[in-house]
Amino acid sequence: MKTLTAIAACIALLGTSESAFAFRYNTCLGHAIKFDSNSQTVNASTVSFPSGYWQNGIQDTVNKFNRNPSNFRYGLAMDSGGVGRNNGQNEVWGGTGSILAGAPAIAYTYWTCYWLFGDHVHMDEADVIFDYGSPWQWTADTVKSSLIRYTGSLRAIQTTGAHEFGHGLGLLHVNSEYNIMGNDFEHIHVNGSTATAYTGEDAADATVFLYGARSPAWEDVAVVHWKYSGASGEYSDHTKTVIYDTSGAVLPTVNVAGETGYRVNRGQTVRTEFTYENNGANFHSGIQTGYYISTNDLITTSDRKIGSGSFNLSRDNVFTTTVDLVIPRDLVSGRDYWLGVIIDDNGAIRESVESNNATYTPIHIN
Amino acid sequence: MRDRRWLVILSALAAACASPMVSAHSPMDNKQAHDLAQLVDRSNLVFVGQARKVVYRNARGEKGEGPIPYTIVTYGIERVLRGKAPGGEITMRFVGGPDGRGRFLTVSGVPVVQEGDRDLLFVASTEDPSCPLVFCEYGRYRILNEDVFDTHGSPVLAIDKAVVISRGAPPRELQRLRFPAPQFNELLQNPEVAAQLKAQNMSEDDARRRYEAEAPKVIEVEVLQDVPVAAPAAQVDSRTTPDARSLPLSQLTSELQVVLRRSKRKPMDVRSIDPDAEIVPARLTVAEPQQPQSRSPARRPASEAEAAESRAFEQNEYNPVLRK
């Protein structure tokens, strides 16, 4: 595809440095409460996750959670027998009624803490229960259009499951940055029609802190169109990233294929916001990032490149920032486009997960 | 400075109003959880009180389940704001807590109360087998030095149109939980402990003497946080800084009085539970999934170039950097 002259992307580090607090965990007698072992099996009820669609969904949840740089891994087994609380097994099932205390999902975690000629502190069992009763509606696939916050009304078991499995590892809620232990259903990667749950930078950091880094090193950089928007009690709230004009005002919005798009003019310089994360083990410098215009919501390097930039990312902070881009003058007035971003678009980093390297914001040409 | 903070708070509130938030453990809409009108309408008793007595008991689980620990709390009632208190005290139970044998159950979304805690509580029903409060943990506001904090310990900063706005780091006092260490005889019931004594070839009497002399009398649990890192100011919620000043209890209760006067639902009687009665835990249900009903809007048919891009993307294992 024809590529216009790329403009130098201006990575604007806004403001001065402050302290960002992130992952939280419980200690007992001064020791972190966590599993002694770096692998745990979760038994899923075959009643709640019958073979096919639902079993694939819970397997996908575990797989996505395991995409992190720590030594810890969950395994999944299907449990055709009974499930239960405090039975010595980590289990996941769907339930109804007061066992859920009014929540869409809940984690029952059993842990040990006592002194007997030394401190004995460890996680014993984590049971995750999804509320399968009204009003909750779940999906077990990765189709973006069915999800709440996109064009549907369903909640993905993958994002909520990742949140609850996080509790199982010993992680607590976080309200100070974009992260899976906040509002999980607004913590998701999207490119094209696919929405993918992921643990994210902060949970990756936490799992490495608690369980150590795996070898060989797990590397993963990512970009999403979500960002931190504030705290709601113990949870972080998230909202979609936006497009500003050069004075910092949010551009007028318009519905583009069911999502919020931004009205732009041909030749206009816009300030495009995305959130960049290093979900892997090591610091990366000079990561090449490309900005693209696409005729659909799937962003790949086959789209038209309109800008580039490079920056550094380490696994200690979620990085939401803006880049100035010029909207090409030859786009068709009155049409919808998608302003895309691809992190590491030269493929320089050998990553364990490449599929989370691109996302978009819809635009409409005035 | 103060004016700017209010602007930030109100902007955040406006954003929150625009889109309902749902947390993993909250009601359908997060906003409900902080809405005094919702809390009042769903409550049958609202009071300020202090946890005078906390005891821990184990309920028998269902077939195949181990014991399920419960925390039984008796609050001394200082002031009733709605409904009729059963007397000067009320006893309630919450699922979770220590089992007395060295293990503990934490249930996400269910508060853990300890002796001495002073709270403003919205009680729905003491009959509930898991949690007696409206929206469970969200029906609890904590009081420290006459200031109010939310259920998680974040300072309550403002009330806007009956919605409580709380932000910021909790004081350390609200991040700690203490409970009695197990008695030696109870600890011995823990199979892990029994195995350790056997492995160490230590007599029960020797172990008991040492335990009673050396073991801490109280087990302390504390929430810790990752060390701070430098972050651009734009990514940090300035309201999470610990200098956030919480509202005094008197201001919250006076705002609450306005909401209480508007409530049309008559509260029902709330009774204390019998702390010695057998605890019947929430019934274990295992449900089948419902087929998703969400309808997807029709997508515009892909052009030839878009279809080719999509195929290339799939063949490239969803890596957006396509091979030339």
Image (tube, coloured by chain):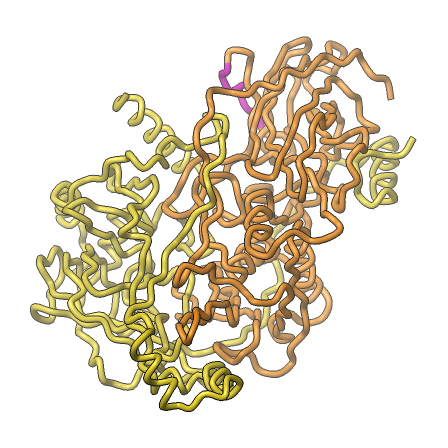
Q: Is residue A52 above or below residue A144?
A: below
Q: Position of residue A175 (x, y in %)?
A: 43, 43
Above or below residue A179? Residue B215 is below
Q: Which chain is yellow?
A: B
Q: In which image quadrant can residue A265 be found?
A: top right
Percent from the top left, x then y, of residue B230? 49, 30
Is residue A251 highlighted in magenta? yes
Which residue is nearer to you in this view: A82 or B246? B246
Which quarter of the picture shows residue B117? bottom left
Quick check: A329 left or right of B35?
Answer: right
Residue B174 horizontal/vertical position (percent): 28, 52
Q: Quadrant of residue B27?
A: bottom left
Name which residue lies at 49% across and 66% down. A133
Query: Residue B19: image x %, image y %?
Result: 45, 39
Prevailing secondary structure of the magenta residues: loop
Q: Residue shown at 55%/34% (left/top)?
A: A240
Task: Please tell me which residue lies in front, B208 or B128.
Answer: B208
Quadrant location of the N terminus of chain A in the rendered image? top right
Image side of residue B236 versus residue B287, left or right = left
Q: Which residues are magenta?
A: A248-254
Q: Is residue A301 above or below residue B174?
A: above
Could you tell me which quadrant the C terminus of chain A lies in?
A: top right
- Name the residue at 64% across, 53% down: A70
User: What residue is at 34 percent from the left and 83 percent from the top?
Assistant: B184
- Counting labels gives 0
Residue A97 visible at all: no
Q: Is residue A227 magenta?
A: no
- The reply to whether residue B210 is in sight is yes
Chain letter, orange in picture: A
